[in-house]
């Protein structure tokens, strides 16, 4: 049940009618409004900037083809993020299979923005920290990476997570707890020098 007005409702309605002149500007506005958030989610799942861009294109292509299946009883953003999550997981599965078949290792691309005013040593340390955390996140299952990305990148509430991922509130809370534990285990085993760092807080923000 939708409790708040959907800010995208007019644009979505225009996108349901590709034969009208308003379709192109409406679709472009939706794309510009959500592309960065879609990319951020896709990147956290695929762990690769090129793959994330592929997911962005694939996701908005699906929006174009499936917009009629969206029902206005929920927010468009909820529907879109669920679609992005599924695209990201499917894309990662396909790419990973191709890479292993080709004898390539799992590529982990890290893009850490350093403080431009920091010293070279501080910037290098920040980049290394970001690389370690991203690599640790990349070792989690797609489902756990997704819920961390949506919780801390998109700052979704438990209720929003439940709607986006089509899960119960109990399952959402359980999965977030599992994700934290799994990430802590990876850090402890693979990156012991980060063990004293609050991983979830340092990577995504407070879990409160």
Image (cartoon, grey):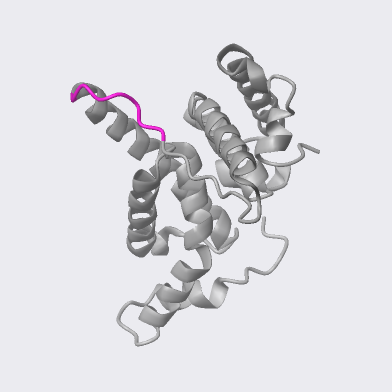
> Furthest-top residue in view?
189
Provide residue 66's location: percent of width, then percent of height. Answer: 37, 59
Magenta run includes residue 115: no
The image quadrant of residue 94 is: top left
Note whether residue 101 is visible. Answer: yes
In the image, residue 145 above or below residue 117: above
**Residue at 55%, 64% in the rendered image:** 72
Q: Is residue 49 above or below residue 16?
A: above
* Quadrant of the image containing the C terminus: top right
Q: Is 107 in the magenta?
A: yes
Which of these two is toward me, 206 or 34?
206
Residue 12, percent from left and from top: 48, 71
Number of numbered tags placed on the structure image: 0
| Quarter of the view holding residue 127 | top right
- Give the residue at x 35% y 64%: 64
Q: How far across and down, in percent of the image, does residue 67 sit?
A: 41, 63
The front one of 180 and 13 is 180
Q: Position of residue 207 (x, y in %)?
A: 76, 36
Q: Is residue 169 visible?
A: no
Point out the residue furthest to the front here. Answer: 120
Q: Write the start and end of the magenta stretch as one range.
A: 102-108
Residue drawn at (47%, 75%) of the image: 29
Q: Quadrant of the N terminus?
A: bottom right
- Look at 69% across and 29% down and name the residue there: 199
Q: Relative to the observer, which residue lies in front, 87 or 16?
A: 87
């Amino acid at each position: 049940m939708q409790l708040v007005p959907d800010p995208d409702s007019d644009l979505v309605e225009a996108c349901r009618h590709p034969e009208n002149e308003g379709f192109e500007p409406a679709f472009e506005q939706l794309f510009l409004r959500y592309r960065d958030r879609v990319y951020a989610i896709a990147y956290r799942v695929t762990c690769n900037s090129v793959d994330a861009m592929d997911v962005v294109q694939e996701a908005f292509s699906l929006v174009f083809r499936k917009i009629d299946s969206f029902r206005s009883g929920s927010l468009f953003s909820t529907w879109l993020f669920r679609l992005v999550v599924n695209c990201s997981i499917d894309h990662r599965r396909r790419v990973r299979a191709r890479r292993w078949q080709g004898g390539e290792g799992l590529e982990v691309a890290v893009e850490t923005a350093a403080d431009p005013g920091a010293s070279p040593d501080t910037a290098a340390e920040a980049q290394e920290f970001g690389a370690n955390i991203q690599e640790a996140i990349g070792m989690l299952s797609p489902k756990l990476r997704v819920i961390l990305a949506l919780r801390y990148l998109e700052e979704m509430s438990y209720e929003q997570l439940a709607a986006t991922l089509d899960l119960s509130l109990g399952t959402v809370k359980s999965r977030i707890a599992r994700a934290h534990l799994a990430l802590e285990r990876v850090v402890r085993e693979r990156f012991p020098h980060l063990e004293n760092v609050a991983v979830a807080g340092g990577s995504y923000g407070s879990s409160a």
